Image (cartoon, helix red, strand yellow):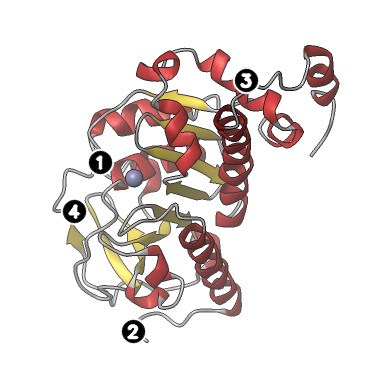
């Protein structure tokens, strides 16, 4: 176990929850090699003096938004594997205190020193910035590679991030849970180089209206009060995609829920 700040019971439980979700991502086949990343704002779970930890600047082109300076994130490190994170969190995540131009690693991988954040850190920072500006109760950002949802983004009618309404109509129609749990639908981000500023910019734009986004030909991102809640959104939506593709592979095009059935679900509360 690495040295660093002493974790309280609440933060220990939070890390256990992250481990469980990392195991779920692995067992679902959504986390090949080092795929996927997690970040969680744990500022409220920490009471600490960080001055004993050396401050570093980000070596990538990550820029800490001003509103995030002073906040603490639990974040998966670059190259970490979800199947390893599920067993050894201290070797695969770091708890960092963000500063104006850098960070201090308080616990986990790289404690007291330098650390390489997840390759999608730009997108995570952009989403956390938006959430804090809105004083949202959402603290977790989860990115993973759900097979069936990604497969849908390869279909010509949904390429380029187009036809978002059509895609949501399809996903809602395949399973009542999708309409109930994700009433705003999923937002679509056209393909960009993973980890790029363009990806971060377009992803943050989508989260102004949605709690879950599809990265074309790449994966999915969701936010939640905790990592478990973010996982639930992706799990529910991927179920719809899987049912649709199952029907297609069985040789028929599903009719799905009717407009009348869907409109009744709009009044349904989670
Ligand atoms: Zn990815």
Identity of the residue furthest to the front in this view: 251
Q: Which residue carries the number 3 mark?
A: 253
Q: What element carries label 2?
A: loop
Q: Which residue carries the number 2 mark?
A: 2
Residue at x-position 35% and y-position 32%: 217
Q: State which tag comes first along the sequence, 1 or 2.
A: 2
Q: Is residue 50 above or below residue 103?
A: below
* Closer to viewer: mark 1 or mark 2: 1
Disc 3, disc 4: CB below 8 Å? no
Residue at x-position 72% and y-position 32%: 175
Residue at x-position 50% and y-position 71%: 47
Location of residue 13 in the rendering, given as x and y in whole percent from the top left corner: 59, 73
Q: Which residue carries the number 1 mark?
A: 195
Location of residue 186 in the rendering, given as x and y in whole percent from the top left corner: 55, 28
Cβ of mark 3 under 8 Å from ligand 1: the answer is: no
Location of residue 170 in the rendering, given as x and y in whole percent from the top left corner: 62, 21
């Amino acid at each position: 176990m690495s040295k660093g700040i002493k974790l309280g019971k609440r933060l220990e439980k939070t890390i256990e929850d992250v481990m469980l979700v990392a195991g779920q991502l692995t067992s679902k086949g959504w986390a090949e090699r080092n795929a996927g990343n997690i970040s969680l704002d744990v500022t409220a779970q920490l009471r600490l003096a960080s001055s004993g930890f050396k401050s570093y600047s980000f070596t990538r082109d990550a820029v800490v938004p001003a509103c995030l300076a002073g906040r603490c994130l639990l974040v998966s490190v670059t190259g970490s594997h979800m199947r390893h994170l599920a067993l050894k969190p201290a070797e695969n995540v770091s708890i960092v205190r963000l500063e104006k131009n850098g960070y201090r690693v308080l616990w986990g991988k790289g404690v007291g020193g330098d650390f390489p954040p997840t390759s999608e850190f730009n997108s995570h920072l952009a989403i956390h910035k938006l959430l804090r500006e809105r004083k949202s109760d959402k603290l977790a950002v989860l990115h993973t590679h759900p097979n069936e949802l990604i497969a849908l983004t390869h279909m010509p009618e949904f390429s380029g991030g187009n036809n978002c309404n059509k895609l949501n109509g399809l996903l809602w129609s395949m399973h009542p849970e999708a309409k109930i749990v994700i009433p705003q639908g999923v937002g679509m981000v056209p393909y960009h180089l993973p980890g790029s500023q363009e990806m971060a910019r377009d992803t943050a734009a989508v989260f102004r209206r949605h709690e879950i986004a599809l990265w074309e030909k790449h994966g999915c991102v969701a936010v939640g009060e905790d990592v478990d809640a973010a996982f639930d959104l992706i799990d529910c939506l991927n179920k719809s995609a899987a049912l649709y593709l199952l029907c297609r592979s069985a040789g028929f095009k599903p009719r799905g829920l009717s407009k009348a059935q869907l409109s009744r679900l709009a009044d349904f509360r989670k």
